Amino acid sequence: MGLFPLAWILPEALIEILLNQIAMARATERLQRYLEDELGECRSEDVEERLDELSTLEAAIGPEQVNTELDVLSALANETRYTLVRVLVAAEAELCVCELHAVVDVTESGLSHALSGLVEAGLVEGRKDGRWKKYRATNRAVALVTVLEGSVDE
Amino acid sequence: MGLFPLAWILPEALIEILLNQIAMARATERLQRYLEDELGECRSEDVEERLDELSTLEAAIGPEQVNTELDVLSALANETRYTLVRVLVAAEAELCVCELHAVVDVTESGLSHALSGLVEAGLVEGRKDGRWKKYRATNRAVALVTVLEGSVDE
DNA sequence: ACGACAGTTTAGAAAATGCTCAACTAAAAG
DNA sequence: CTTTTAGTTGAGCATTTTCTAAACTGTCGT
């Protein structure tokens, strides 16, 4: 292996950085070839410009909001939790934990975890009523479930 | 442990089933007490009725569609894949794999895996063009990203 | 005050995910 | 035809997720 001598001289971390840069450079080269193919000709300015356009597309909304959106998606992307949300949305009313327990096949503990995840994602709100606890779907949950059910029917 | 003698007589699987039934019975008892609390009085018919209502809520849409929806959610609930979808939606056009490579921080292989997951979830469509491959967002993706960005701004 | 009850929290085991490396297919260039 | 290039696929590892059991908090009935 040609790299062995290098490993004696350079710290591992640095090597990794260099390899990374090489990979980056390769990816950029490919983009350049692609733009040449598409545009007929292509100077490195064009590559820069395209890279800018792409990062603009990506940054159109703040990274903080993207994170929130990912949290919401992760909260919904689970059979137990999605079932709970769907039921609460369909109910259009508060339901008690003990009622929700009837619709999902997990232990009481699992149910509690699921609900607290949904609260954290802003999909559900909880309210304590004496010794019972009741949950209801938020507007966010209603909007998402509605669109999901609409966009996935064919 | 009182259960040890049982374990000699009954197969493990059967014991598990029995424990399950006991847990179920307990959950139903709790629901009964809850309904008594809420309605003032409650016969076991009322419990049956409530259980029916709940399962109706849950079964409002077919289990097959629910599965599709879960697949879609799982596909979106990942930083790499969600970024790709957002960029493709914002672009309102096909993008080449080599362009997409510029916006997500994974290897070429990881990118390919991500895209094929999105195709499977019906969020993205791929088209081969010579030696390049181009992807575009589907209507489903547009609808979902739009609602997500709308429902998570405050 | 005590015990029973409704629900939550913590810790940890089992299962699913996400990524990379390496081997592969298909198209274009030499 | 051989090599290079663009992208995909499969295997395997590391991390994360999801669930459960057990201990815990707060509320009610007695």
Image (tube, coloured by chain):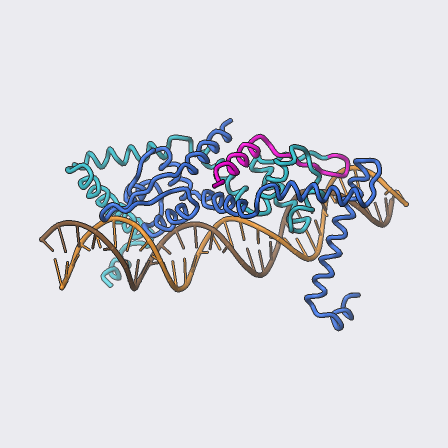
Chain colours: A blue, B cyan, C orange, D brown
Q: Position of residue A83 (x, y in %)?
A: 39, 39
The residue under the point 19% across, 34% down is B45
**Residue at the spot 41% in from the left edge and 36% down from the top edge:** A139
Image side of residue A72 versus residue A134, left or right:
right
- Quarter of the image with the N terminus of chain A is bottom right
> What residue do we see at 55% from left, 36% from top?
B145
Q: Is residue B25 left or right of residue A89?
A: left
Q: Is residue B137 magenta?
A: yes
Frontmost residue, B127 versus C26: B127
- Left or right for B125, reference A38: left
Residue B144 x %, y %: 53, 35
In the rendered image, residue A46 lying in the magenta stretch gets the answer: no
Front-lying residue, C12 or A122: A122
Q: Residue furthest top?
A: A154
Numbered label tally? 0
| Quarter residue D25 falls in | bottom left
The answer to whether A92 is drawn above or below residue A4 in the figure is above
Q: Position of residue A122 (x, y in %)?
A: 42, 44
Query: In which quadrant of the rendered view does residue A14 lie?
Result: bottom right
Image location (x, y in percent) of residue B146:
54, 34
Q: Name above or below for residue B45 compared with residue A111.
A: above
The residue lying toward the viewer, choosing from B55 and A128, is A128
- Magenta stretch? B129-154
Residue, far bottom: A8
